[in-house]
């Protein structure tokens, strides 16, 4: 999402909407992240909940590591001389 925020994702969002539609990546990932946080907050402690926090931590780590590790390659364009 950070590298391609304008990407489009074909999806459904159950249980609310059962037909496919296209969403921008920023909205889809934002919705996913909010759902992870909400489920982490409402899951009782005796049921664990480690997976929710792992998703949240992985997302945050990936968000910051993208800045550190991603280095776009410079594209060199070569032109052939016309004969």
Image (cartoon, rainbow, N blue to C red):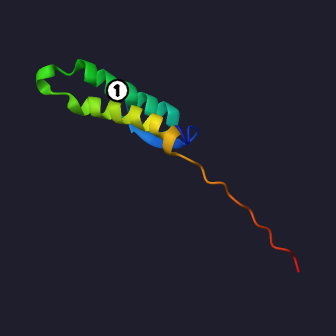
SS at mark 1 in the image: helix
Place residue 82 in its image quadrant: bottom right
Residue 24 visible in the shown view:
no
Residue beneath the point at 53% across and 46% down: 70
Residue 70 visible in the shown view:
yes
Q: Left or right: where does residue 82 sit relative to residue 50?
A: right
Residue that protrudes farthest toward the bottom in the picture: 83
| Residue 79 x %, y % | 80, 68
Residue beneath the point at 66% across and 54% down: 74
Quick one: quadrant of the C terminus?
bottom right
Residue that protrudes farthest toward the front in the picture: 68
The one nearer the camera, 44 or 66, is: 66
Residue that protrudes farthest toward the left in the picture: 46
Q: Which residue is mark 1?
A: 35
The one nearer the camera, 69 or 40, is: 69
The one nearer the camera, 1 or 31, is: 1
| Residue 18 x %, y % | 37, 36
Place residue 5 in its image quadrant: top right
């Amino acid at each position: 999402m950070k590298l391609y925020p304008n990407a489009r994702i074909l999806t459904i969002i159950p249980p609310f909407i059962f037909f496919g539609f296209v969403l921008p990546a920023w909205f889809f990932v934002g919705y996913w992240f909010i759902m992870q946080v909400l489920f982490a907050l409402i899951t009782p402690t005796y049921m664990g909940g480690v997976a929710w926090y792992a998703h949240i931590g992985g997302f945050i780590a990936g968000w910051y590591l993208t800045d550190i590790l991603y280095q776009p390659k410079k594209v060199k364009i070569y032109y052939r001389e016309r004969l």
